[in-house]
Image (spheres, grey):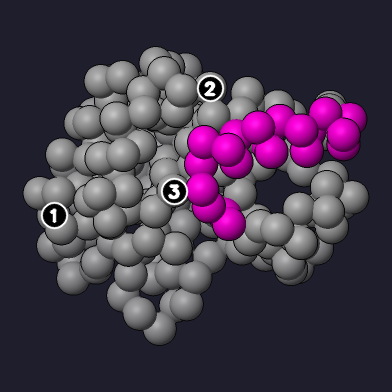
Amino acid sequence: MLKLIKTPSFIRYIYPSLIWNKEKSRKTIYLTFDDGPCKDLSNFVLDELKKYQAKATFFYLGKQVEKYPKIIERCINENHQIGNHSYSHLNGWKTKNKKYYKDINKASKLINSNLFRPPYGRIKISQIKHLKKQYKIVMWDVLSWDFDENTCAKKCFKNIIENTSSGSIIVLHENEKTHKKVKEVLPKILNYFSSKGFTFDVL
């Protein structure tokens, strides 16, 4: 399987209406976290961000928000940003549009945001056209591969530091599968880029 870490420029060219990265003139990085809230990991992530006065954007699943409402409340209170990642993590390529939109709308009742990130990064052209009326659709330019069981924490860290530059949008995940890796990698990311003069901000 081809593991794309840095999003190729031709993909960004094909889908120019999607957000792949941010302004490069500022020495700023944009950490994003998908699939949360996650019981223990989410509070760890928020604690680590606080240590570095770092801000991040969290693309939450509606079904997880229902389980852990206090975590999303804490996230907002600490001036982080939230986004809609659907209710039940449907694959846009494999889901009929009507069902896909219904799932996103269900999540929107729990997640008040104009940002949307498609689960798996998979979304049809027709879905983009429809959702653009209501959302800014956010993708990424650096994928850590923390979700892959064959990618260790050390490799995730390497993937990030070798491919990140000013304006990069980095993806990490908050779920049981990534729990140990993120706990190891996140403090290193925050320390590494902070020491090089970068700041971390919301999108």
Q: Are marks 3 and 2 in contact (CB under 8 Å)?
A: no
> Which residue occupies 57% across, 54% down?
115
CA–CA distance in space, label 3 to label 1: 19 Å
Q: Position of residue 51 (x, y in %)?
A: 10, 49
Residue bearing mark 2: 63
Is tag 3's residue or tag 2's residue first in the polypeptide sequence?
A: 2
Disc 1 target residue: 52
Residue at disc 3, secondary structure: strand
The residue segment tinted magenta is 96-115
Residue at 84% over, 57% down: 129
Name the magenta segment's main secondary structure: helix
Compared with residue 118, is residue 9 higher up or lower down, i.e. above or below? below
User: Distance from label 3 to label 2 (Cα)?
Assistant: 15 Å
Does the image show residue 52?
A: yes
What kind of residue is marked 1? Tyr
Q: Residue furthest left?
A: 51
Which residue is at the front of the view, 23 or 146?
23
Amino acid type, mark 3 = Ile
| Residue occupying image coordinates x 44% and y 63% | 203
- On the rendered image, what quadrant is the N terminus found in? top right
- First in sequence: mark 3 vs mark 1: 1
Picture quadrant of residue 186: top left
Numbered disc 1: secondary structure: loop
x 28%, y 25%: residue: 41
Residue 4 occupies quadrant: top right
Residue 187 shows in the view: no
Q: Residues within 10 Å of mark 3 (few under 14, many from 20)?
A: many
Query: Type of residue at label 2?
Result: Lys
The residues bearing labels 1 and 2 have C-alpha atoms spaced at a distance of 30 Å
Residue 69 badge: none
